[in-house]
Amino acid sequence: MSISTQETKATLPNETVNKLAQLVQINRDSASGFQEAAEAINDKSLASDFRVWAVDRTRQADELNALVEVNDGQASDDRSWSAAVHQAWLKFRSVVSGGDAYAALAEAERGEDAIKEKYEDVLKEVAGSAATDLLQQQYANVKAVHDRVRDLRDARKSKK
């Protein structure tokens, strides 16, 4: 008679922990980008949105990092896996410093496309994991922010 072990949030496979660590970093990049944008953009309403999103992404990174750490993992600062995502956020930061809300939102949407895609990939790769519920909750938030950024961008495009 064999005893089956069931995966828990504290006994995640190393591959899952590594994927979560990647999401920690992408959320940190996103939070940093939104925070820097909030400080640089001239539009006070948009700056407020950026601050809220930065706090949300920090919370998401912290939630994921707790799972990584309880599984003896460590969030990586190696950006080789996310070079495109990181580049999108760097470009976003440079654009927002010019103060153009439309350009900033267009770049933010590129970054949001990348984080949304990363969550979709991870959700497929770790389907059925004990971490899936958290990932789905966070993905819903990522998608909502993505859609809001897109809508704000589109609204400003029509004003140009």
Image (cartoon, grey):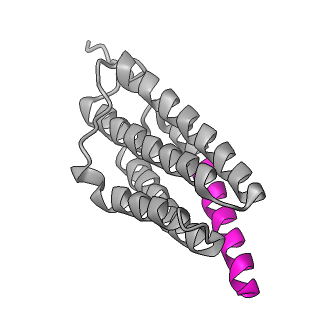
Q: Nearer the viewer, residue 150 or 1?
A: 150
Q: Could you say where residue 24 lies in the image, as x and y percent from the top left?
A: 41, 37
Q: Is residue 115 toward the left or the right of residue 54 in the image?
A: left
Q: Quadrant of residue 91?
A: bottom left
Q: Is residue 76 left or right of residue 100?
A: left
Image: magenta residue range:
141-160
Q: Residue at x 74, y 77 (%)?
A: 155
Residue at the image position 32 percent from the left and 31 percent from the top: 75
Q: Could you say which quadrant of the image residue 153 lies in? A: bottom right
Q: Is residue 154 magenta?
A: yes
> Was residue 105 drawn as part of the magenta stretch in this picture?
no
Residue 67 percent across, percent down from the top left: 43, 24
Q: Is residue 140 visible?
A: no
Q: Classify the position of the C terminus by image quarter.
A: bottom right
Q: Percent x, y for residue 83?
A: 28, 58
Task: Determine whether 140 is above or below 132 in the image.
Answer: below
Main SS, magenta residues? helix
